[in-house]
Image (tube, grey):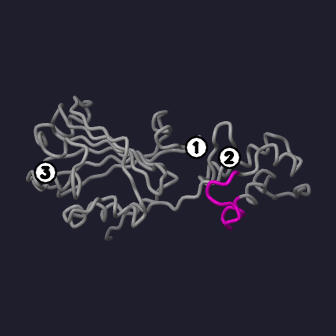
Amino acid sequence: MFESPVPHDPPIYRRIADGLRARILSGELRDGDRLPGENALMADYSIARATARQALAVLINEGLAVPKRGSGVYVRLFKPIRRHGSRRLARDQWGEGRAIWDADARGRPFTVDEVEVLREEVPEDVADILDSRESWVRRRRYSVDGRPVQLATSYFPARAVEGSAITTADTGPGGVYARLRDLGLAPAHFTEEIRARMPAPKETELLGLPGGTPVIVIARTAYTAGGMPVEYNEMVLDSAAYVLQYDFDA
């Protein structure tokens, strides 16, 4: 049992969380292991249920643990993905037939699922960007090391990509940017806007997000050398899974 705290000591729930965190980071508790539940913490530390819940919530909010309804709270260790904004979009990446995700995963296994490709009338704001109300839309989910980390929805002007591999599930080596190049519409310039928000229910479900986890939203537009917008892509990232890196000169 902990001794009564002295002034300036952290509250007891934080000291319990610190002890559990140390066990996780030392490797004593491994990815997928079940953490002591509220009842066990109450018995071990003579604390109220609300205090035990607070201790576990600290680790959940830090991304070190995830609750599973009706089962308990489990260790969730994941090496963050370092997303290098310019390196992943470099022409020598997709131009040589490599997926831009190779730059993110860096040898770690990644998969794409929940793929949906449809011709749609798009929202007005997207239509204004692409100067096209009718677009081919590609929706997909990306996972790294078996963990869902990103949802992405790309829009392409229908008149520009009609009949190309961009309108199929498998776009081939180099992905959509290589196929745009084949159409004479190679991307030459990108803009990205980044913001954070809380996820929508469907996003929480598809990404398997613990309660209270925000997402990072990256909106990217790709332009040809002549300034024609050829893709608008909105990506929704699990904020606990990413480090965003940007390099630029002074």
Question: Mark 2 highlights which residue?
Answer: 73
CB-based contact (under 8 Å), mark 3 and mark 2: no
In front of the other: label 2 or label 1? Answer: 2
Task: Please report whichever mark, 2 or 1, sits nearer to the chain's N-terminal start.
Answer: 2
Give x and y (percent) for residue 33. Answer: 67, 54
Label 3 to label 1, Cα distance in Å?
A: 41 Å
* Amino acid at the residue labelled 2: Val
Disc 1: which residue:
210
Q: Nearer the viewer, mark 3 or mark 1?
A: 1
Tell me which corner region of the image, top left, top right, bottom left or bottom right, holds residue 27: bottom right
Distance (Cα) linking label 3 and label 2: 50 Å
Task: Say left or right for 142 vs 32.
Answer: left
Gap between marks 2 and 1, in whole Å? 10 Å
Reply yes or no: does residue 23 show up in magenta: yes
Q: As drawn, is 171 to the left or to the right of 73?
A: left
Residue highlighted by disc 3: 227
The residue nearer to you, when weighing 228 against 113, is 113
Q: Quadrant of the N terminus?
A: bottom right
Secondary element type, mark 1: loop
